[in-house]
Image (cartoon, rainbow, N blue to C red):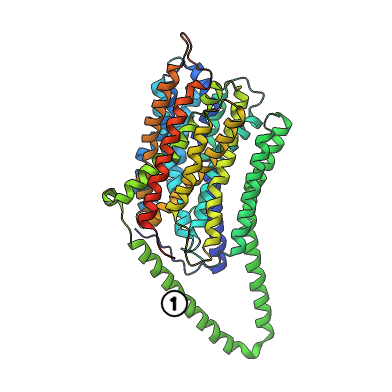
């Protein structure tokens, strides 16, 4: 189904402003659309509170990812529903899944099964918000800039864990009840509030040609500044109280600062319109000529818009969808290379709390480690699309499979480095894996359209990301089994590098295979510039 909203009463200036506002709406949604990313911060506490084994903790991480098995429902719903309602559905599922856990976590009859099922419900809600944001960016921006728009939006998902950690530190520092409840409350409420705020702007509009280069440059500068602030905050995260609240305020201002772009666009358009009207009032003798010129310009613009619409229609008419892609070798190369790299990185991040505990880190230090992975994941998601922006000026874009294959190799090295027992190796490898996992995840959005077209994107990409729950189960369960072999009798926590040593070697080999598969995919799909 092709989404076109033709509004003859909408001026080009209004269209351009709404275009930027719709992008900002997706940015804010994505910033709070990672409630599962803060799980490592409170997983150890949850493990003690409910007497859950390491295998059980990994199954909870799997439950969040298992919601993605039904992510195709959001793609199907997006065919018939406006994007704001798709996002609202996702927020409501998160409210249900995480909200009930917040309310009943301390209840003695609130069992592990309840936590598992509700975590899966909340995980499925993430897919709905992702689908809405992807489609708004793809539909509201022209072909030469939609990749950049998608990249800016999805990069903020990497900031979710950092934002939730900062909010929890600022809001609940002096509260006595469990840290797990702090995060469950934020996970349930924050996406709902944000979806209500951005709902009026989360809609499809006719792509405007006025998405200026200066607008994207400004957005990149703001995004870069936000990322730098996130890293600085991570370094100083050991401080508490007033500093945390002040930092939370400064981070909030940075997240609101993209609003300057549509305001500047609107102000520029108003000033140009005012200047043009004054000029017309002074030159009465040329009214007829100018009227003819305007009519001619309007006709040319309408013809250009018709050509653009035809190009979008042609582009969306091409490509494979649904079951068709399952018959393609390229799909399986893509699927398994993603499974053995980005999904593996997500499994590592899900286990970060237990990894930190096994290395002897305190729970406050675990928050710092999670914030570090989140901050670098943010930059990882951003930089591929910064390259896209500059390469779009050339006649040939950078191949997505080639980019992914290049990023997978250093990830494999980082897994091998984790075998070293030093804290430096832990922090460095966490930063690398966080950054490159974010980059591959972000690039995959464009890779899906590059390989299979845009027409069935919402369904195709949800089929691709179905590998995440598969990998979460297989890799997470295997890591938990190896972890439990290192337990001392009567203990449910493992200590020392041996707890995950063999797991890291296995993950390093697996990620190397992913790089090889993605290289083969690139060789099969490469285009000569």
Q: Quadrant of the N terminus?
A: bottom left
Residue 413 placement, left or right of 459: right
In this orientation, which residue lies closer to the viewer: 127 or 398? Answer: 398
Residue 196 placement, left or right of 321: right
* Quadrant hosting residue 420: top right
Which residue is depicted at the point 47% across and 43% down? Answer: 408
In this orientation, which residue lies closer to the viewer: 10 or 328? Answer: 328
Q: Position of residue 365 (x, y in %)?
A: 62, 26
Relative vertical location of residue 515 with respect to residue 175 in this rendering, above or below: below
What is the residue that sits farthest to the right in this orientation? 242
Which residue is depicted at the point 53% across and 33% down? Answer: 417
- Callout 1 secondary element: helix
Q: Position of residue 71 (x, y in %)?
A: 37, 42
In this orientation, which residue lies closer to the viewer: 84 or 34? Answer: 34
* Quadrant hosting residue 373: top right
Relative vertical location of residue 325 with respect to residue 295 in this rendering, above or below: above
Which residue is depicted at the point 51% across and 46% down? Answer: 439
Q: Position of residue 259 (x, y in %)?
A: 62, 54
Q: Which residue is mark 1?
A: 303
Q: Quadrant of the C terminus?
A: bottom left
Q: Position of residue 59 (x, y in %)?
A: 40, 26
All told, the count of numbered labels is: 1
- Can residue 134 be seen from the camera position used here? yes
- Can residue 84 be seen from the camera position used here? no
């Amino acid at each position: 189904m092709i989404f076109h909203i033709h509004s003859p009463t909408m001026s080009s200036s209004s269209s351009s402003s709404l275009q930027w506002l719709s992008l900002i709406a997706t940015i804010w949604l994505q910033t709070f659309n990672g409630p599962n990313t803060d799980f490592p911060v409170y997983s150890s506490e949850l493990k003690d509170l409910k007497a859950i084994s390491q295998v059980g903790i990994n199954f909870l991480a799997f439950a969040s990812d298992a919601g993605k098995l039904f992510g195709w429902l959001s793609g199907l719903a997006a065919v018939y529903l406006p994007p704001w309602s798709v996002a609202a559905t996702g927020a409501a599922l998160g409210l249900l899944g995480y909200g009930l856990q917040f309310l009943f976590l301390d209840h003695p009859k609130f069992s592990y099964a309840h936590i598992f099922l509700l975590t899966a419900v909340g995980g499925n809600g993430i897919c709905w918000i992702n689908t809405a944001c992807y489609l708004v960016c793809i539909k509201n921006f022209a072909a030469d800039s939609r990749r950049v728009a998608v990249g800016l939006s999805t990069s903020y998902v990497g900031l979710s864990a950092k934002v939730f950690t900062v909010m929890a530190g600022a809001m609940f520092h002096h509260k006595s009840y469990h840290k797990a409840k702090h995060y469950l409350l934020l996970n349930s409420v924050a996406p709902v509030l944000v979806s209500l705020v951005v709902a009026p702007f989360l809609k499809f509009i006719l792509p405007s040609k006025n998405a200026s280069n200066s607008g994207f440059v400004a957005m990149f500068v703001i995004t870069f500044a936000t990322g730098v602030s996130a890293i600085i905050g991570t370094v100083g995260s050991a401080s508490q109280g007033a500093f945390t609240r002040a930092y939370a305020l400064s981070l909030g201002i940075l997240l609101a600062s993209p609003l300057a772009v549509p305001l500047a666009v609107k102000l520029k358009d108003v000033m140009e319109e005012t200047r043009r009207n004054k000029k017309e009032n002074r030159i009465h003798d040329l009214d007829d000529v100018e009227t003819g010129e305007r009519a001619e310009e309007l006709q040319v613009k309408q013809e250009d818009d018709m050509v653009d619409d035809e190009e979008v229609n042609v582009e969306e008419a091409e490509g494979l969808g649904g079951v068709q892609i399952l018959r393609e070798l390229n799909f399986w190369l893509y699927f398994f290379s993603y499974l053995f790299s980005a999904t593996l990185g997500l499994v590592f991040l899900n286990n970060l709390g237990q990894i930190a505990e096994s290395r002897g880190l305190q729970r406050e230090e675990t928050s710092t480690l999670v914030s570090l992975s989140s901050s670098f994941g943010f930059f990882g998601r951003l930089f591929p699309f910064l390259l896209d922006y500059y390469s779009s000026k050339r006649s040939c874009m950078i191949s997505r499979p080639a980019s992914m294959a290049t990023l997978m190799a250093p990830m494999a090295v980082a897994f091998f480095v984790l075998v070293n027992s030093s804290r430096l190796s832990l922090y460095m490898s966490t930063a690398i894996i966080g950054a490159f996992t974010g980059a591959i995840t972000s690039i995959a959005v464009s890779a899906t359209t590059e390989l299979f077209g845009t027409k069935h994107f919402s369904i195709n990409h949800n089929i691709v990301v179905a590998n995440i729950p598969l990998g979460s189960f297989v890799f997470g369960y295997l890591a938990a089994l190896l972890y439990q072999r290192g337990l001392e009798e009567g203990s449910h926590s493992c200590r020392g590098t041996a707890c995950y040593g063999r797991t890291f070697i296995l993950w390093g080999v697996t990620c190397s295979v992913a790089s090889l598969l993605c290289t083969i995919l690139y060789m099969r799909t490469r285009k000569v510039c």
